[in-house]
Image (cartoon, rainbow, N blue to C red):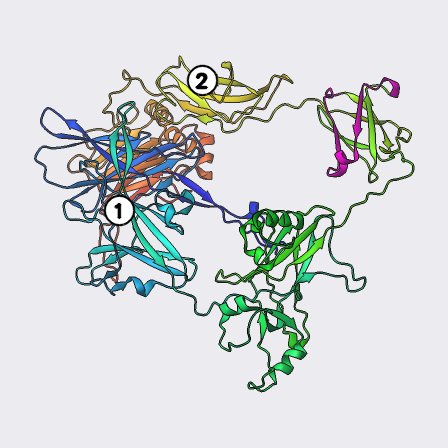
Amino acid sequence: GREYSITVVPKPSENVKCAKAEEIKAIKIKTEILLQAQKIGYNNDGDTIWKLFWNPIVMENPNIKVNYKLSRYTNNLNPIVIREIYDKDNYQITIKKGDTNTYSFKIDADVYEPGAVLPIEFISETRVELKEQIPQTPQAPEIVDIFETSDPPLKYEDFLEPFSASVFWKAPITGEGIIDGIITYDIYLLKDVKDINSLPSNYKIASDISMTDAHKIKDKDSGSIIGYKYDLNGLTSNSTYYFVIYAKKNYLVPNNTDGLMVTRPYKSTPSVKVIITEPDAGGNRPVAPSAPPFGVEEDPETGLKSITYTGATLVLDKIWYAFYEKYDNEEDDNEDDNEEDDNLRGYWKQCSKKDFDENEGLDSEYVNKKKSQKVVYEAGWSVKPHVVSYSQALDVIRNSKKERVGEYIAYSDLFDDVIKNREIPQREARVPDIVGDDDQDQDQTFPINISGLKENTTYLVWLTIENQNGLSSDPSDPIIITTQVEIPPKPVKPIVPTDLKGIPSDSFVDLFWTEITGMDYEIKCGTSDDISQASITKLVTYEDKRDRSFFRVDSLAPDTVYYFWIRAKNAETGEASEYSNPELIKTEAHKPPAPPTGFGIKTGPDGVTESSITYQWTELGEMNYILEISEDINFTQLKSINVNGDTYTAGGLISNRRYYARLFAYDPKTQLRSMPTRTIMVITNKSKSEYDSSFDLEEAVTGDGLDIPAKLEDGVWVISSLGADAHVLGERIRSRYDSIVKIDLSVPPEKTTTIRLELSSVVLDALASMRKELYLILPWGEYTILPGTFQTDEYFRMKTRSNELEFRLETQSPASQYVPLQTMAIKTPVTDFKLSYINGSPISILNRPI
């Protein structure tokens, strides 16, 4: 029962242009209304009384009118609308004793916003059956590996892939032998078996999920549902996962505190499926970069490295050539080493393309031929920089590996958590798509930036490469970098700033000037142009201004002229410049606060009663509020109320009466109040003395104001609302809040040949001004006349001659004067409509079709 606006906002890389977020149109979706049933007892005749209830619709605009449509299914046949319910969230149904039919219900809704011609439709497909349920814990899902009778047969191993898997379980059966379709499931996907006993919420991949057609497994012979399937994607190859699933079923149970019925989920014990994904045959681990091609970017002209005070730019080649080098303690006696052995026995070292080509040209039996490869990092692979303070790394190695002789960091230490835990987080890069190959002399080098470093500090830096399958390389050769030392220049003599400027507010001024690195500044401020009478003195140190472009002088009076002086000071020598010329700046006068937001009516039964209305809004700190309530929209006779907080209940009101309200924000400091919010209108509920509880809110307009005779005039049934009756009917139309006025003429007197409806322009104008539809029910059809249908130019010209027009609609079916063509075969009777004014003037055009 909610309407949501969803916007998909792209977040591309910096060099990609795309639409701005505010330019992207939101898509609106509506959720179904959850209908529930509760058996509440029996009447004196033994009939069963059921209560149907639902969560009321809530929209952004609180002044909506909601028309709920309750539909009934009898023995699962097509539904019929049995009741339209206005602005309520429950309805009682009585089932006769001995009635053996099966009944189920669903609820739809039409929401009318102020001024809208058409309603917002909420359509629900979920049904609730009148069936009393005893709360009980559902059975745990029965996970199976095969469904032999499905079409086609499903086997767990057929769906097990390196990066995906599917889990099957049998469909739950009720005690009546049918599928329990209201069971939902919570699903977790874990990597650690120890998490099964205390499931982390961040591993939940599905919550309260219902099984749709995409999940259902059906028997190939009967077509009935025999199980469900859940697909898992984005897994890691050759890894172990634990699929944990719970069955959940909601029951209505009494609340322990107030006895009201509430929905409470009952949860089964968990079922667990161990999933071991297949190894990725084509996904070998990327080769760890050697140094070079991994290194620090250098200026080709100066040879200076790209290392700053807080960061550096690293480089790596997308394509490079390598010879395999064994560690010194390894024997060269195994010709069949695989990739894993390579990582343990040696490493890949960069070689030139010339040496690579010469080695490739050697005979395979040549004893000195080296093992070699062309290393290619595919576009889109992740390059992850790893940065750790060198001194911190030495400290943790010293403390964790006390048996080590000497202080050093070994390559194997890069795998250790004690090092990884000291890493400075870095933004990973992507291998770019470099057009061309190194054979075409295309530069394959690309940059990787690191940041968040401290000046004059030594760091240990290495890379890892991760392919599209999530497989990561071993650490690259580590390199050591030292950030630059920032030595700010110290001016010999402070120079007085000449460009002091300021931006004022009501209580502060932000000052700007061109500062010199390492220099402090002194600011004086006063309301006189005599610097000796300055009442405010501020010292702005170099560190205060280093990371900001302005300095704020606060605690000032509003709407006041201030004079500002500034001078430079050398903190080390104590030498200071002269003061600048005074800069005159006037603070702004106090501004009224912004109008309150979120002003509306509190939802729930206590929002609007017979004698009270509860208003609510979004409260802002340090603000008071003024609520104005009136019985007329112009607020000529209003009641003003000073309130605090974010809600207020206006009591002592009259039932069934319109009340208009608006809200102001009031700032006690400035004693100013905002512009008012939009005006909202609410009608208090009717009291029991004003209408009976069985009153049909949909009743057609009859009685006073509409003359519906029991007799005919020469076979013509004349229904009219003219003269004084028209004014009565017009007022009744204005007093109804629903957007449709229904006139039911479906049962005319016997021997009726023609139905004639005569309406005054007073009635037509009331329908048009209130934007309400006239809904005519005739024996031969139902017709909607939209507001403003007859208000044409011709209509207004005639009203200049006569203030009140009389309109006639005459209809009969089948039409007596209609003769079809010989080539036409009439399937249903033709209905004849004649539209005119009672004075005889014809109506030649309509604004809208009927």
Nearer to the camera, 565 or 615: 565
Name the residue: 60% across, 85% down.
Answer: 362
> Where residue 786 appears, x then y in whole percent?
38, 39
Residue 460: numbered disc = none
Q: Can you identify the residue that label 2 sits on? A: 631
Q: Is residue 334 left or right of residue 71?
A: right
Residue 327: horizontal and vertical position, in percent?
A: 59, 69
Q: Earlier in the sequence, mark 1 or mark 2?
A: 2
Is 1 placed left or right of 463 in the picture? left
Is residue 134 shown in magenta?
Answer: no
Along the line of sight, which residue is nearer the eye, 182 or 345?
Answer: 345
Residue 360's place in the image compared with 176, above or below, is below
- In the current view of this chain or complex, which residue is farthest to the left? 98
The quarter of the image holding the N terminus is top left
The answer to if 544 sits in the magenta stretch is yes
Q: Quadrant of residue 53?
A: top left
> Which callout, 1 or 2, points to the residue nearer the camera?
2
What is the spatial separation of the Cα atoms under label 1 and label 2, in whole angstroms? 47 Å
* Left or right of 567 on screen, residue 471: left
Question: SS class of the residue under badge 2?
Answer: loop
